[in-house]
Image: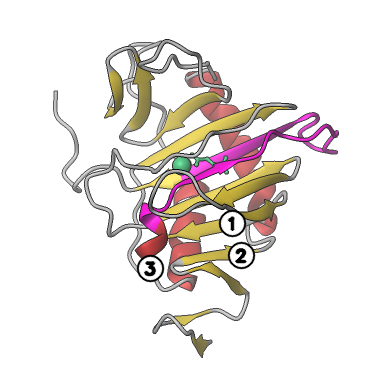
Amino acid sequence: MRQSEFGFDHGDAAEAIVDGAFLLRGRALPVVDELLVGVQDVVEASPLRHMITPGGAPMAAAQSNCGALGWVADRRGYRYEACDPETGRPWPAMPQVFASLARDAAGECGYDGFDPDCCLLNRYEVGCGMGQHVDADEQDFAWPIVSVSLGLPMTFRFGGVERGGKTLPVVLQHGDVLVFGGAARRRYHGTSPLKRGVHPVLGACRVNLTLRRAGTGALPRD
Ligand code: SIN
Ligand code: FE2
């Protein structure tokens, strides 16, 4: 452990990317088989789908969720919901390995006590990407976002706090964990389109797990 320039301890493995954002290369590899079983279980219960944005366009990435809350886009807007609108049932429970990896990775970057209540799954096919956006539907921006990359490499891009302008590219590989909190939590970010390739385990796609603390801590009631 060492004191980082941002004023807290983090493991030597954490690479500072921008203020508040750290890359833990290969951090998920020791549990990758368990993660993939978890992904399979989640998408069996709540299948991947292309949600429709308020503007009427389908999202490029196919998405699902697990945990107490799931991120939803539809004609009415963006929000978190306790039930999957496609199945009418609660989102599948978050596999323990997702939550423990996220908690440990966040802790290694100085964000202690991270207890995610949502994991958004994004599956990108070749040529698909995600436009610049801020994760803004969560109740408390004090919590970081933990992002786990599986499958083909993809270029993630950090922008600034205003839309537009230059972006900083970060190549995310199978097993990498990106943690962004603090000042980075309010930055625009997105990805370049997925480049052609075939990953030995996942084939011609990338799956991203985005772990978040969306709610206040109280379980949603209906
Ligand atoms: C996101 O920002 O929601 C996902 C980015 C990624 O797939 O790495
Ligand atoms: Fe995001």
Q: How is the image coloured?
A: secondary structure
Camera-side residue: 115 or 198?
198
**As shown in the figure, which amino acid type bears the numbered disc 2?**
Leu
- Marks 1 and 2, the one that precedes in the sequence: 2
Measure the alpha-carbon separation of dots 3 and 1: 14 Å
Element marked by disc 1: strand
Say which residue appears at 59% left-offset and 56% top-offset: 177
- Label 1, ligand 1: CB separation under 8 Å: no
141 relative to 116 in the view: left or right: left
Element marked by disc 2: strand
**As shown in the figure, which amino acid type bears the numbered disc 3?**
Tyr
Say which residue appears at 56% left-offset and 33% top-offset: 130
Camera-side residue: 12 or 182?
182
- Percent x, y of residue 45: 49, 20
- Percent x, y of residue 196: 83, 32
Report the span colored magenta: 185-210
Q: Which residue is mark 3?
A: 111
Q: Counting other residues with Cα less than 10 Å from the Cα at mark 3, is it few (<14), some (14-19), or many (20 or more)?
A: many
* Magenta residue check for 28: no
User: In the rendering, which numbered label is found on residue 85?
Assistant: none
Measure the alpha-carbon separation of dots 2 and 3: 14 Å
**As shown in the figure, which amino acid type bears the numbered disc 1?**
Val
- In the rendered view of the protein, which quadrant contains the C terminus? top left
- Percent x, y of residue 145: 42, 52
Q: Which residue is mark 1?
A: 177
Element marked by disc 3: loop
Res 122 quadrant in image? top right
- The answer to whether any part of residue 181 appears in the image is no
218 relative to 206 in the view: left or right: left
Asked whether disc 1 touches disc 2, contact meaning CB atoms under 8 Å apart, the reply is yes
Camera-side residue: 180 or 29?
180
Q: Which residue is mark 2?
A: 24
